[in-house]
Amino acid sequence: MFDFLEGYDVLGAFWTTVQLTLLSAVGSLIWGTLLAAMRVSPVPLMRGFGTAYVNIVRNIPLTVIIVFTSIGLADIFRVTLGAADDFEALSFRLSILGFVAYTAAFVCEAIRSGINTVPVGQAEAARAIGLSFTQVLWLIVLPQAFRSVIGPLANVLIALTKNTTVAAAIGVAEAATLMKEMIENEAQTLAIGAVFAFGFVVLTLPTGLFLGWLSKRLAVKR
Amino acid sequence: MTKVSVAKEDVAASGDLVVLKSVNKHFGALHVLQDIDLTIARGEVVVVIGPSGSGKSTLCRAINRLETIDSGAIAIDGKPLPAEGKELARLRADVGMVFQSFNLFAHKTVLENVMLGQIKVRKADKKKAEEKARGLLDRVGVANQADKYPAQLSGGQQQRVAIARALAMDPKVMLFDEPTSALDPEMINEVLEVMQQLARDGMTMIVVTHEMGFARSAANRVVFMADGKIVEEAVPDQFFSNPRSDRAKDFLSKILHH
Ligand SMILES: Nc1ncnc2c1ncn2[C@@H]1O[C@H](COP(=O)(O)OP(=O)(O)OP(=O)(O)O)[C@@H](O)[C@H]1O
Ligand SMILES: [Mg+2]
């Protein structure tokens, strides 16, 4: 029944998808948190940068960003990310750069909404014992903000998992690229579509369930 | 005898701890602090009292620089309040603050609440910080709650932890902004007792409160504020039984009837 899978490395393709997702998730969590810190910082220049970044980046289609990393960064500006002669590795790294740049805007907004759920009294009490602005942010405000936005961050992560299929546009051998190839070569298009759809559900469903559980467990009681 | 006189000389020698000179503060068009002059000596306990909106909280917050002021000067222990940055943070650590709504760090245990400032601001090592935190929690009577989270404690217990958290910084002066007004009546006394003990131990305190029992038994002075001004200052007995200003008379007649 599944003989159409023969000769194709479906698992390998999904493994690439998983790698794209995880590396981009870590990157965008870090960059998104820094952006959120900028957006609440007392320095006007940082606030301005954070706001401009988020508003520009989240309004550009992801495909445009990913294609730009390939054509703009690699072809025009000769960015090699340490993989000058290895086309596959280069497009893999470039696509991660694009995913991080894009997803971080959404991570930033999720965290910022979390910051707004932390009562001002928390930051005031922290300032009152002599903590600096950065300490107040990292020790008191962000830990509480994170816990209140695990749900929204799970949505961002699930969207990211599916968004990694855009990497096909610059030739990264992830799941969608393989699916296109198989549909071109095999007759069972519906079955192929179903296999790949199932693959993504297998990746995203447990993520959603686990983070939903975590979000309840870590919720800050007031 | 000798002990008392030595203590008195100490006070005289070390002088004034908190000095406000012609402090002004606006919120938009609202002039919330109007030419405030106030001096608090080391070891003195001052109760600030006055109608809602008179600027009591703003006064406390200005002393701790949680609010900026428009003009005038505030000095703590002879040092003027720095504008921003590291130095300000250090100075804030010397001024303990207790809020009406406790504001314990919700994601940290009671013990961690009392340890955090010692470790991050005073750079104490963890073991010493824990030892001190446990001692302070014991002193305010909540040692057995050390591993719980704030939300698991009653209001009175939370406020006592908040006092311990402030004390952990070895502050020179403690500010209390209506520390008992968010509490159920049966919990007010447990907090007032801790504050009374603190006053007896010689802590310099500025307390915004309408608890007259506390003012009479613990305060050296009552400062009455109305409409952003200090209207009257007197020792508690004189203030409560024989207020001079009409504003104070009017205010006292209202709170005494409740
Ligand atoms: N952040 C702010 N922005 C604008 N106005 C403010 C702000 N904080 C306080 N005010 C106003 O300043 C005035 C003084 O406020 P403050 O909180 O100092 O009064 P209070 O004496 O502490 O009153 P209460 O007894 O109700 O606590 C009030 O009219 C209040 O509405
Ligand atoms: Mg007030």
Image (cartoon, coloured by chain):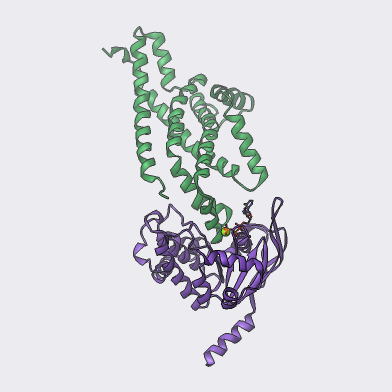
Chain colours: A green, B purple
Kindly tell me whether residue A9 is visible in this rendering. Answer: no
Which of B71 and B75 lies nearest the eye of the viewer?
A: B71
Kindly tell me whether residue B76 is visible in this rendering. Answer: yes
- Total marks shown come to 0
| Residue at 46% across, 75% down | B197
Q: Picture coordinates of residue A58 (x, y %)?
A: 57, 29
When asked about the image quadrant of residue A67, the answer is: top right
Q: In this view, does B30 lie to the left or right of B150?
A: right
- Figure quadrant, ligand 1: bottom right
Q: Picture coordinates of residue A18 (x, y %)?
A: 40, 29
Q: Picture coordinates of residue B107 (x, y %)?
A: 43, 52
* Vertical position of residue B217 compared to residue A73: above or below: below
| Residue at 46% across, 57% down | B104
* Vertical position of residue A183 compared to residue B187: above or below: above
Q: Picture coordinates of residue B124 (x, y %)?
A: 48, 66
| Residue at 42% across, 31% down | A19
Which of B187 and B172 lies nearest the eye of the viewer?
A: B187
* Vertical position of residue A175 compared to residue B202: above or below: above
* Vertical position of residue A119 compared to residue A161: above or below: below
Q: Residue furthest top?
A: A187
| Residue at 44% across, 72% down | B193
Which of B103 and B221 lies nearest the eye of the viewer?
A: B221
Which of B187 and B128 lies nearest the eye of the viewer?
A: B187
Q: Residue furthest left?
A: A1
